Image (cartoon, helix red, strand yellow):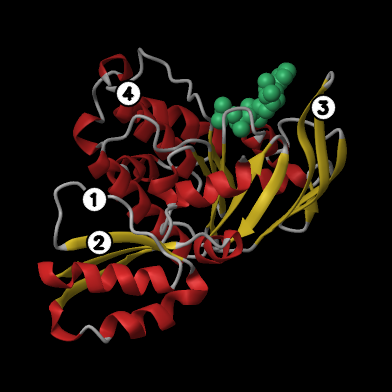
Amino acid sequence: MIAVESVERHFGSIRAVDGVDLEIRRGELFGLIGHNGAGKSTLFKMMLGLLPVSAGHIRIDGEDIHAGNFREVRRRIGYLPENVVLYDNLTGLETLRFIAKLKNCSREECVAALETVGLSHAANRRVREYSKGMRQRLGFAQSLLGKPQLLFLDEPTNGLDPEAIRAFYATLRGLRDSGVTVVLTSHILSEIQERVDRLAIMAAGKIQALGTVQSLRERVDLPLRVEVRTEAALGGALTAILGSFGITPRPVEAATDRLVFDCPRQLKMKLFGAVAGLGEGVADVSIFEPSLEDVFFGFAD
Ligand SMILES: Nc1ncnc2c1ncn2[C@@H]1O[C@H](COP(=O)(O)OP(=O)(O)OP(=O)(O)O)[C@@H](O)[C@H]1O
């Protein structure tokens, strides 16, 4: 759906995007993460044809963004900018009807979009009275008008509460399952973890890593965090086993029946075999994969 080849964008001496190659498949839910100033919004604007590239090529649905026919492709793209601009004097429904006129959509579609983002109850209230999260949801509703086949959402969950974030991702999954391609940016790494099909980590204008969350975890080869609960008397025996693998448990405050330690991936099965040898004195074992934060800092630092 999206092919980005050797794309650069310079602002004077700043190389905001510095040689990006990226392919995003049709029907994929794709996340772009990175620190402030990494180049995410600039890349978005170029993919939308809003900002010319300094070098390289971008094709959307087979069409070069600089080709005359791109206007046709552009109609099938929905965009939620990082800072959505709304007219305070219009109601939520009037806001959508205004955009709908430009996109040739019906009133029914506006009503349905408000329903999708959970704003039906506020359809006739002026935007001036909307909370930050409501404004953000109205911006999302705008981007859905015209049934786009491709959605670019820049920091879409900004200002949303946890319940609204959950509802938002449920909507995205529904869209993805109906074949819509979704590309979104976020700073909140724990939020997009497990929710996107693939993601790219961007830093200093470059894609530093690209893949599924699991494949990135494996590539940075971060250890697993393991927590073992034992009968108190077994703590010493477990510490000795860990020592034989070169592992020192982390200090855990006021816990005599719990050991927490980092386990290199390649030792996992051997170590668990040895721990299992302790028999029923081992009450429980929990294994935690590194978070996306850990993975992110592994690549972006
Ligand atoms: N119009 C502009 N003129 C000059 N520099 C710009 C312009 N737009 C972006 N930049 C610079 O390009 C770099 C990338 O900015 P960009 O907005 O793409 O980052 P971002 O990853 O979206 O950051 P954030 O997460 O803070 O939104 C920054 O150094 C920024 O200052």
Q: Quadrant of ligand 1?
A: top right
- The amino acid sitting under disc 1 is Val
Q: CA distance from mark 4 to mark 3?
A: 32 Å
* Residue count near mark 3 (Cα–Cα under 10 Å), binned few <14, some 14–19, many ≥20: some
Q: Give the mark toward the camera: 3 or 1.
A: 1
Q: Secondary structure at mark 4?
A: helix
User: Earlier along the polypeptide chain: callout 3 or callout 2?
Assistant: 3
Tell me whether circle 1 and circle 2 mark residues in contact (CB < 8 Å).
Answer: yes
Q: As rendered, which of 206 and 175 lies closer to the eye? A: 206
* Residue that extends furthest to the right in the rendered view of this protein: 55
Q: Secondary structure at mark 3?
A: strand
Q: Quadrant of the C terminus?
A: top right
- The amino acid sitting under disc 4 is Lys
* Residue count near mark 1 (Cα–Cα under 10 Å), binned few <14, some 14–19, many ≥20: few
Against 299, residue 243 (above or below) is below
Residue wearing tag 1: 252
Residue 120 locus on image (x, y percent): 23, 38
Q: CA distance from mark 4 to mark 1?
A: 40 Å
- The amino acid sitting under disc 3 is His
User: Earlier along the polypeptide chain: callout 4 or callout 1?
Assistant: 4
Q: Quadrant of the N terminus?
A: bottom right
Q: Report the disc number at residue 10.
A: 3
Q: Give the mark toward the camera: 3 or 2.
A: 2
Q: Report the disc number at residue 132.
A: 4
Q: Please tell me which residue is depicted at 52% across the width and 61% down the height of the picture.
A: 217
Residue wearing tag 2: 259
User: Earlier along the polypeptide chain: callout 2 or callout 4?
Assistant: 4
User: Earlier along the polypeptide chain: callout 3 or callout 1?
Assistant: 3
User: Earlier along the polypeptide chain: callout 4 or callout 3?
Assistant: 3
Q: Report the disc number at residue 119.
A: none
